[in-house]
Amino acid sequence: MTVSDVAQLLQIECSDSNESTISGINTLRDAAKGEISFLSDSKYEKELSSTKASAVILPASKSHLLPDNVVALISEEPYLMVAKLSKSFAKPIQSSDIKPIIGENSTVFPTAHIENGVKVGSGCTVMSGVYIGADVLIGDNVTLYPNVSIYRDCVIGNNVIIHSGSVVGSDGFGYAHTKSGEHIKLYQNGNVIIEEDVEIGANTTIDCAVFGSTWIKKGSKIDNLIQIGHNCIVGEHCILVSQSGLAGSTTLGRNVVMGGQSATAGHLSIAPFTTLAARSGVTKSITKGGVYSGFPLMEHKLWLKLQAKLAKILQ
Amino acid sequence: MTVSDVAQLLQIECSDSNESTISGINTLRDAAKGEISFLSDSKYEKELSSTKASAVILPASKSHLLPDNVVALISEEPYLMVAKLSKSFAKPIQSSDIKPIIGENSTVFPTAHIENGVKVGSGCTVMSGVYIGADVLIGDNVTLYPNVSIYRDCVIGNNVIIHSGSVVGSDGFGYAHTKSGEHIKLYQNGNVIIEEDVEIGANTTIDCAVFGSTWIKKGSKIDNLIQIGHNCIVGEHCILVSQSGLAGSTTLGRNVVMGGQSATAGHLSIAPFTTLAARSGVTKSITKGGVYSGFPLMEHKLWLKLQAKLAKILQ
Amino acid sequence: MTVSDVAQLLQIECSDSNESTISGINTLRDAAKGEISFLSDSKYEKELSSTKASAVILPASKSHLLPDNVVALISEEPYLMVAKLSKSFAKPIQSSDIKPIIGENSTVFPTAHIENGVKVGSGCTVMSGVYIGADVLIGDNVTLYPNVSIYRDCVIGNNVIIHSGSVVGSDGFGYAHTKSGEHIKLYQNGNVIIEEDVEIGANTTIDCAVFGSTWIKKGSKIDNLIQIGHNCIVGEHCILVSQSGLAGSTTLGRNVVMGGQSATAGHLSIAPFTTLAARSGVTKSITKGGVYSGFPLMEHKLWLKLQAKLAKILQ
């Protein structure tokens, strides 16, 4: 697919007739030559001048900010255009021809399904009903309990344990919205990286990144029924208790503790050594570690004081 | 099983010795000739006179409201009687003798399990560990990721995507309670209908209807770890964010947005174009679209004002 | 592994050179001869004098409380030592050589995986993708829907129904923490016991006990997407509505009702016939049955009063 093909597919104007081949979509910052990018939020405007993308979808008013050698694809709805385009670059479920490689002393149960391109290290146990998608890389001494699903391209470090029913790398929840209220899927082409010594409970879901990686750093422990949205980063040695949730693109520093049923909004940054009490709800970034409670969130001490005040109201 | 057999099984009085065969249980409104119905809530009393059921379980005081040709089965605990009876009409897990039909260009992974009576359209992908129950109908270009379970009789529209571990058509959570505190299962004989262009995330659960259908309308997008109770209707182009939940028999209008960890009680109606903020809890029907927050629920503006007032209390 | 081996593995002091074999780890109260125990919380100090353990890991200051024939293994971080030791006693995923025994009139789908040592009663249905771990005992007339996972050693009573994707017996979320902020897994060697007439919804998770049993008593009904932590006891005829959660070691009396998205902290005791409203959060034990709401929890009547007061603040 060439830049001109993209313009034609999306029925949008193209600053230059251009036959160079497009290999994928990426952010302004991470796009390489041959990739297409987009500007859907003005806060990324400053990245236009240095992008290496071959073409960028953006509003007419911003096209002058692009370097000379980058083609402008003009749209007032760039995010919607990217979503429509993304299906063309969605990775297939099956791709590689390379038979999976299973390391020494690893056990694969008969009903596990391992796609081509997969490498499983030594000393692993891949139990019944497990699905390992194309090109997944699995380290040594990994245990995948029954009915775990790992989507294509994910990377699982040494000594990781994933309990039954958990899903790693499912599509992030990303859509562009049309004026008439329809939701157009933004196909998610990233992956999930899980570092060594991570344990993941049962029926937890970790979505893949739209571009790049959702990333669980080493030593973190994640309980049952937890949601981790696309492009989140969970720092080293975090503890996430059951039924907690992270909306997309939020970053936890190291040793963050999230209590049961707590949650964060998306695009936040939580300072290292922060403890979020059970049920707390975070809507703003936290810059200083400490113990926080409530929704809206406040320092735990303040929350206790508020509850005391409310109890007085009742007297 | 005849009406007399039913009376004998439940050890209740029958207004008429009747040997007509009963084929199933249904609501007063939807019951056809040959079906049995019941009156467990007086708000449905007005439907007695027009029911087409062959017999109705109801309290003695209401039996005079029935048409002459409908047999009255007298009980002061009609809901409990229906629950006890429902096991006799529970559909078997396997039934049809008709081998499944798989459309052109559809891929079925070897460990998928497809029951008899199933039809899968063209261009579908049915991945490893997927279960498709008896008589399920699946449209074209449907993708079922690994370890999805679809119970019998469900209907899945074109272009639907269901991510790993999600369950469609599991039994609704319905029980009648005895005076000694036991819970008697009301076997759920309905199904789930999912219309075209719906996407469902990972490890989400959508229960079948007790009678009739739980219904997800076209274009709705449902994230991970969401609960949709029996007999809910989700309107067109709704967005349900992770860990939200709908209790039974609630209806969402079109383009309703439910934030993360939000929930509704059962038997509610939510106006089209309503946005429920993350964590909001709905206990009453919403008749006017808008943005709502909190638990108890209020207009989002009011909720912000409340939080400001509470912050002042702390000063 | 002898007591001396344990001391050497953990690099801790041993009160007695001792070559007796250690077969496992257990609590002070439940340990038998040949087992090792530990004192990590001073509230269990009174159980030291009567323990039957062959050796106990405990701080130097407490070693004089042990009976003469019990070896003291001295550590100021006994819980961390137990965690480090627990891996040596973790049960293997596969163990017994005894082929599974399937009762009369039971159906096992071809892609179900049943380990050695399992007994399945009569009239059971074990559907596709189900995993039944080593030495699990399953009663009569049990239905396991597709992709259910039951970890080793669990016990499932007669007439139990478990819906798709639920996980019984996954590891409890238990770790000891090092001074540098790492989390050391405490391998969980207990099981889950589910008594007769229990129904469990879809994608629910019930963790095994660290020692002993997590226990769901007869007639309880558990909805979808629920978390039950390790060592919980759910009394007879309880009702747990979707997305509720129990942290570890909490006990519900009989006929407790937990509303949707409600939760309890760990190590609590909830009185029989308690109803917890939807979304309520319990942080203290409840000694008297009644209806409770809110977080922090209060009597439901009081919660209604509080909401009325808050509404006034807004005027």
Image (spheres, coloured by chain):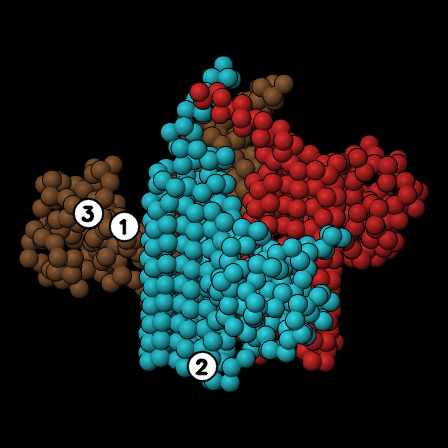
Chain colours: A red, B brown, C cyan
* Circle 2 crowding by C-alpha within 10 Å: few under 14, some 14–19, many from 20: some
- In this view, B138 is above or below C5: above
- In this view, B228 is above or below B262: below
Q: Taking B265 as reference, is A44 left or right?
A: right
Q: Amino acid at mark 1?
A: Gly
Q: State which chain disc 1 sits on.
A: B
Q: Position of residue A64 (x, y in %)?
A: 88, 35
**Camera-nearest residue between A304 and C29:** C29
Q: State which chain disc 3 sits on.
A: B
Q: Which residue is mark 1?
A: B181
Q: Could you say whether the residue bearing mark 1 is in a helix, strand or loop?
A: loop
| Residue name at image x 36 percent, y 63 percent | C195
Pick whichever of labels 1 and 3 is earlier in the sequence: 3
* Labels 1 & 3 near each other (Cβ < 8 A): no
Q: Could you say whether the residue bearing mark 3 is in a helix, strand or loop?
A: loop
Q: Position of residue A284 (x, y in %)?
A: 69, 34
Q: Could you say whether the residue bearing mark 2 is in a helix, strand or loop?
A: loop
| Residue name at image x 57 percent, y 37 percent | B278
Q: Which residue is mark 2?
A: C100
Q: Which residue is mark 3?
A: B77
Cα separation between marks 2 and 1: 37 Å
| Residue name at image x 86 percent, y 40 percent | A48
